[in-house]
Structure formats: C-alpha cells, structure tokens
Image (cartoon, helix red, strand yellow):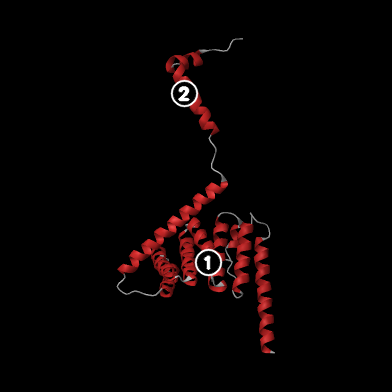
Amino acid sequence: MAWPSIGITTVSHGLGASALSLLLTASLCFAQEPQPSAAFATAEARERDAETLRSLVAEGQLLYERDKVRLDGYQYCSQAVALADRGEFRESIRAASKALMLAQAEGNDHLEALAKRDLAIAYNYAGNLERAEQYAREALGQPNSDPQRIGAPASKVIGDVQARRGEYARALASYQHALAISGEKLIVPASATEFVSDDLAGFGAAVEDFREKLAIGQGQLSEGRNR
C-alpha cells in the first residue's frame, strides 16, 4: 500500500527546497539546544532573590528619608511586629525594610537577622510563601543570629510554608526544630492536626506527644528549681 504524498508535496511546493532545508535545520538545532541545568536555575533564583532584597533595601531608604520622626532599627522591628499582629502587612513590610536598610548601613548582622525575621512573618501572614521562606532562611543563615528571638520564629515560618504546600513531614520537623530552639513554647498551631489528618498519618498524635513531653519536662524543671 503506497503512503499518500499530499502533505510532503504541499510543503515542498509551498516552501521550496531551500526554505524547507532551513526549516529542518532550525528544528534540529532547537531540538539539540541544551536545557538549563539545575545549577543554572538555582543561580538564577538566587539572583532574583538578591534583586528583590536590593529593591527592598532601596525602598526602605526612601521610606526612612520621608519619616518625620526617625527611629532606630530595633524600634522599626518592634513596629513591624506590631503592625503584622494587627494585620497591616504592607506597613509591616515597610517598617521591616527600614530596619533592614539601617542594619546593612551599620553592618549590624543581628539587626539584619531580626529584620529578615519580621519580613518572613509579614509575608507568611500575607500568604506570599516564596518570600516568606526566602527571608526566613536568610534570617537563619545570618551571622550572630539569636536562636530564640530569630531561629525559632523563622523555623516556625518555614514550617507554616511547608504545611501550606502539603509537605507535612517537613513541616512537622520544622515545628519540632522551632520548639527545640525556643525551649519554652510549642508553636505548632492546633489547627494543623485537622488539615493533615488524612495526608500524614500520626501527625496529630505526634503533636500531642510533643505537648505531653514538653509539659513533663517543664514540670521536672520546676521541681528541680524548688528543691
């Protein structure tokens, strides 16, 4: 049985031999073009993050210059926390960006870590998971980072992000890490046991077990102090 030659004849007549040859060559080149490597994609993502950070610092500089009453970096961090608690996320991010700008201008690593912690918290509340995770991880990696004031809240943000993405095993590990760092409060949200019950068997039980161990540990510590 002979194959129909209508398609080939039409293309050949429509384009001409030279044009058809160029088209085939271009198709082969496109097919053979190497795809971006994982390392390249990672480097590109880091550059985007760095550009976002530079833009945020620049915005912080402009906002700071417009302030009639200028605060120090730590006061802007306190302001950012208060604004985030009230649900004023945009203003919280602006306050944190001013703290970040001052931290970089002063070379204050501790203040920079606090500012990035506050940015992570504000973006987490606002639902911007990518930025929340970015600044939380940067806060954790910042030199002179304070474990209780920075490490625990940043780890908690990472846990929240992972839970929202459905990465419940990782989320639990992040929450446990946050608890281990804080040494005082179990900051795993009670509602977490509800939305992961079908996806991660034993998550709710693990949270309750963690609460019980924490209560026992705190009780033993109090008894030791009273002796």
**Which secondary structure lies at badge 2?**
helix
- Does 8 sit above or below residue 77? above
Question: Which mark, residue 94?
Answer: none
**Rendering coords of residue 126 (x, y %):** 45, 60
Question: Which mark, residue 142?
Answer: 1
Residue under the image location 54 percent in, 58 percent down: 161
Q: Amino acid at mark 2?
A: Leu
Residue 104 or residue 178, whichever sits in front? 104
**Which secondary structure lies at badge 1?**
loop
Residue 192 or residue 128, whichever sits in front? 128
| Farthest top residue in view | 1
User: Quick one: quadrant of the N terminus?
Assistant: top right
Spatial CA span between label 2 and label 1: 54 Å
**Rendering coords of residue 33 (x, y %):** 53, 35
- Does 104 sit above or below residue 128? below
**Rendering coords of residue 71 (x, y %):** 37, 75
Residue under the image location 66 percent in, 69 percent down: 210
Q: Are marks 2 and 1 in contact (CB under 8 Å)?
A: no
Residue under the image location 36 percent in, 62 percent down: 59
Q: Earlier in the sequence, mark 2 or mark 1?
A: 2
Question: Which mark, residue 22?
Answer: 2
Residue 188 lies left or right of residue 17; in this view the side is right
Q: Residues within 10 Å of mark 1 (few under 14, many from 20)?
A: some
Q: Amino acid at mark 1?
A: Gln
Residue under the image location 50 percent in, 57 percent down: 129
| Farthest bottom residue in view | 227
